[in-house]
Amino acid sequence: MKTTLALLFLSFFSLITSCDTVSSKKNLETSLVIVSDYLTSKDTVLFTAFAKKEKVRIFIRTKTTDQIIGAFRKSEYGTKYDIIMMSSLFDVHRLSKINCLHPITELEDELIETKKFSSSKYNFIGFGIDPFVLRHHKDTISRSKTYSDLKQEDFNTNLTQEELVPMLSALMSRLNKVQSYNWVKQFHERKAFIAKPNQKSPNRPVFLTTYSKGIDTKNKDLFKHYKDIFIPNQRTKGSFYDLKTFAIVKQAEHFTTAKSFIKHYLKEKQNLFLTQKLNVYSVCKNKRTIRLYKVSSDNLIQYYSMIQRIQSKL
């Protein structure tokens, strides 16, 4: 009898131990997959504090917007992505159009301070502000002090047509259709796209870029003939800007962890840490040091299609 009881106790103990081991192993293997058009696998160090706190392994998959869209079209809920982090409003808007983003309504309590930079219509949350800035040539005199001045002066830019859309949409929000077409046309005729420092480029008096690209040390040769960053419209209606964004994938496998991740990096201290590392401004009001154009993301996005149609005709 004693032998039987001993065996039963050992069996029960083994079962409990086994369950605890599986449970512990499962907790250690909780993961979060981020897909991004600008982060790489090396950037997981940015999220070390969250990973340790939540006992999560974070993976980053670097994909272009077209590749992300292709993955969703091939396997709608089988991409294994949890969070999407995009470098531009234009690109997260493209993703929202294929209906692959989870509604942000469950995070609205976290967005009171940053509501202007988020969209329940397009299901993204802005966490980093990337203003459009100018760098003036050291040896020439530039007349460009505002964005509107750019249609009157030849300039260089390392921004693609798509990357320019958020800036142009801010301008168009103040113009009618005819004025918008004429403005974009003049703007297009004045610009020269310069992506690499070894390209032969005209000696133009001003360079249009974003804040993040303008201070990136990788671009120092591109700007070696230009002065420090100048942020336009600080004495008027505020600077135009792009956004770094979070979005949760619809049917995300690790949905709860994804929500916790976003909540974590919307807190002031953590948001400031992340945005400084990414060379953008914090969305937290107390940490903003520049004046911004006061139009919501939703209102600006409505002009995107019109801008693309104009660009396609030029």
Image: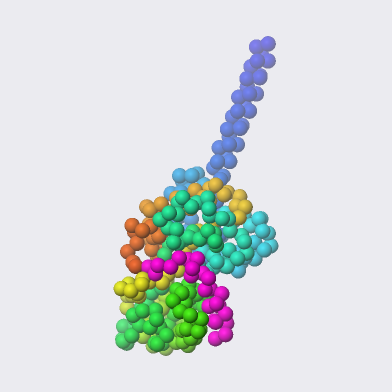
Q: Looking at the image, which is closer to me, 149 or 219?
A: 149
Residue 287 lies in the magenta stretch: no
**Is residue 86 something that shows in the picture?**
yes
The rendered magenta stretch, by its main secondary structure, is classed as helix
**In the image, residue 294 lies in the stretch drawn in magenta:** yes
In the image, what residue occupies the spot 57% across and 67% down? 94
Residue 192 in sight from this viewpoint: no
From what the image shows, is residue 2 above or below residue 307? above
Task: Name the quadrant containing residue 292.
Answer: bottom left
In the image, the segment drawn in magenta is 292-314
For the residue pair 114 and 74, the one nearer the viewer reads as 114
Q: Work out which quarter of the rendered image holds the C terminus and state it.
A: bottom right
Left of 280 or right of it: where is 31? right
Residue at image position (48%, 72%) is 166
Residue 127, placed above or below residue 2: below
Residue 261 in the figure: left or right of residue 269: right
